[in-house]
Each structure stands twice: as structure tokens, then as C-alpha cells.
Image: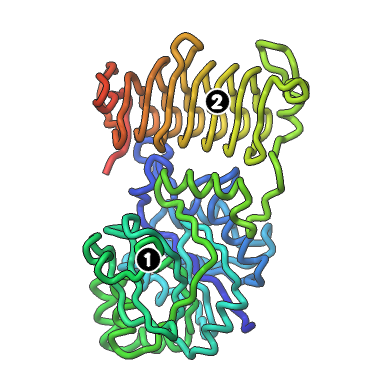
Amino acid sequence: MPSIAAIALAGGRGLRARPLTLEGSGHIRSKAAVPFLGRPVIEWLVAALRDQGITSFHVAANGRENRYQVKEALGYGERLGVSVRYSRPRTDRFNTGSGQATLSVIEEHGLLGHALVLPTDSLFEFDLAALARDHLASGAVVTVGLAHRTAAEVAGTYGLVLADGTGRIQRFIEKPPVETVAAVAADLDRVPINAGLYLVDCARLRALGATDELAALAGRALDWGGDLLPWLVSRGHRVMCSPLAKVGDLGNPRDYLITMAEALAGGYPSLRLPDGPVIHPSSLARRDEVSGLTLADKLAAGLVHVGPGAWIGRDVEIGPGVVLRDSYVGDEADLHPWCRLERVACLDGAIIGPGARLSDAYVGVMARVDSSLERPAVIDGFTALGHEVRVAEGAGLSGVIAYPGQTVTGAGHSGGRQSPSSGSSTSRPGQSPTSSGSSTRS
């Protein structure tokens, strides 16, 4: 396998992923720095690629948050046993899209070999050596990593890929409507899409980037899926595709939670997660205020049930009657008696009240779910609660997005979204709940 560098694309404002990408009003969290199982996403990606032999990383960053939050997570790579370089801040204004950012880093850092270009809001399972063999054997300038989704998932969201029998790509259709997907896809349950991961020949791509035609296109906009790849194909350059074993999207709350549950169940071997439940010793030794027993005592007595796909951080306090399955619980969180969490990301310092029932939910740092056995809070449907959100006792939320610092009262409905307002009130069934506090919206 030839020496391969990595180009990590860290740009955008994380609009789809909100509130995961909001620290507070006016404070954006880079998608690359979003916490995932206790570590920034970018750290997981670098560690997984390092284990496959990549030790040279080049971050194409755009914007203050993306640039310096990634740098805070990775530094220059010494801690992870790799080297990390960053694009110059002065190039930001010229980076009109992901394709242009890639070309800019290749030129600025003098890359002439092969590079793996990847987004920083997804997880990937693939064999890098096999991908490199296919790429070199085909003589491609770019080999596109393929994922598969259903037609309903692809429509309006992903870039559809059409290739011939040899794997040479003939056409890209960016975010097609469902009618187009149905008309061109051979299997509506396995539609091939562009996963955003590319193995590229830097020298050839660099030479093409210097041509007047591509330089002019880059001056207006140059995104990988919508511009650069279609341009390469239309000009007769060889662009191939290669299926990836698995791709997990982290770019919105629903996909984040699905990917997290799959990772906890062992679905992403490259993360090297330990088998069975992960419980920090400090949490096993911690006593709750109700029973006075340690978590270890309660587990031994069957008073708490922790499934194999569970991760419990440091100094977590867990009361009797708690059920935890396929969920991550961050440091210093409190899970009060008889609450139940299934497929939940519960970040540091969050408080889950007695009897609360949460499934398919994201709970931000120091968020608080008030609940009682008489009036339990019920949260499901891929609800996402931002940092320091407070949910009122007895609330029922499904598919709700609440931004940092808000107070949520009443009953929610699928697709509901919290909006900033003053004061608080209780909504009627079938309405989106109201909230108080400030937030950043788009």
C-alpha cells in the first residue's frame, strides 16, 4: 500500500445537527468537535485511520469555530501518535466549498502522493488497503467511497451515484427527488450514494486544479458532490467507486443516536470499544442518596439493570430501579430512582428525574429532566435537548428540538421544534411545546 495522507474537511455551521452543534446562544460547536462517547468525533476518526496506517493528517478548516475547536481536540497530533497540519486562516475566504478546500490544502501543503479525503461528521468502516489496491489498479484520479441507503432516505438528502459494471462512475445526481431515485435505482432498498469519502491522486488533482477551467469554477463554488466530481466525469477523467462496509452519519440528532446505539452494540469495530457494559470504577463505588447502596451492590442485588450496550462515565450516581440499555451516560450525571433510558446520549452533568422514561433521545450537558413517579416525563422520537435545557415534570416530548438554556413545558409532537420566547406555558396535545430562554436559530 502506498503512503496515504488524510485530508479532513472541517467546515460548515452544523445547521442540521443543532442543538448538538450549539454550546449556547451565539456559541457554535464544530461538527468535528461534537462529543461522541466521551471524545470529539474527530478524535475517533483520527485514531481509527491511524490504526490503518495513516499518520499524516491535513485539516482543511473553515471558520473560527471549526479551526480552533479541532485544534483544541487534536493539537498537532503528538498525543495520538500522528502529525496534524492545518490550512492557513487567510485561505478561508477562498474556500468556496469542500472541493476547493481540498484543492487548496493539496497545493498549500505540497501533497503529491495519495490522500484520503473525509468529512468530520461521519464514522466509516472500510479496509484502506483494499480501497488503495482498487484505486491504483483502476488508474482513477478519484475513487469514491459508496454507502447504501433506502430510496426514502436518499431523496432530497444524499448524492446518488450511477456506475457501469466496472465501477466507473457515469453520473452523479445530487439530492434527487424520490421520483428520480425510483426511476434510476435498481434496488430501492440499496441505493448507492456518495459517502463523502474519497481516495485521490493528489498530483493529478493538483494539476487539474491549476487549469483555467477548473480555476474559474472554483472562483464561484466548488463542492465535491455537486461540482468537482460531476466536472471530472463530464471531462472524461476516470472516477471510480468502491463500496464501504459501513457508514454512520452524525450530522443530525436522529442519525447521531442511531449511529451511537450501533457503535455501543459493536457495529463499528474500528472504534475498538470494549465488549459488554463499560462502567467507570468511581461510578460503581458511588452510593445514591435514596438507598445508600453503591452501584456495584445494586447491580449484584438486581436493583439496577444495565444492558451490554451501555457506557457509564465517572462519578455517575444511579438510584435503585434504573434501567439502562444501549445508552451513553457522561461524567457526573444523576439518574434518579426508577428512570429508564434506552438508546439515549446523556452528557456530562445531566439530571434525569425519578420515573422518567427516555428512548431515542439526546440530553445535553447539565440538562435537567424533572420527573416524579406520579408525573413521569416521557421523552422519545429522537428528541434532542441542548445544554442546560430544563424539561418540566410530566412533560411528554416526541421529535422535539430544544436549544441550549430553554425550559420545555407541556406535550410535544413529532417534528416539533422549540423556539425562543419569553416566559413558559403548557402546550396542548398535538402542538409544539413552548419554551423560555434564548437560543440561536437558523
**Residue 97 percent coordinates (x, y):** 33, 67
Residue type at numbered disc 2: Arg
Left or right: 433 with respect to 27?
left
Q: Earlier in the sequence, mark 2 or mark 1?
A: 1
Q: Quadrant of residue 129?
A: bottom right
Label 2, label 1: how far apart the Cα atoms are: 36 Å
Front residue of 221/191: it is 191
Q: Nearer the viewer, mark 2 or mark 1?
A: 1
**Residue 253 percent coordinates (x, y):** 41, 43
Q: Quadrant of residue 413?
A: top left
**Residue 165 percent coordinates (x, y):** 41, 84
Q: Which residue is mark 2?
A: 340
Front residue of 297/307: it is 307
Q: Residue furthest top?
A: 374
Q: Quadrant of the C terminus?
A: top left
Q: Which residue is mark 1?
A: 191
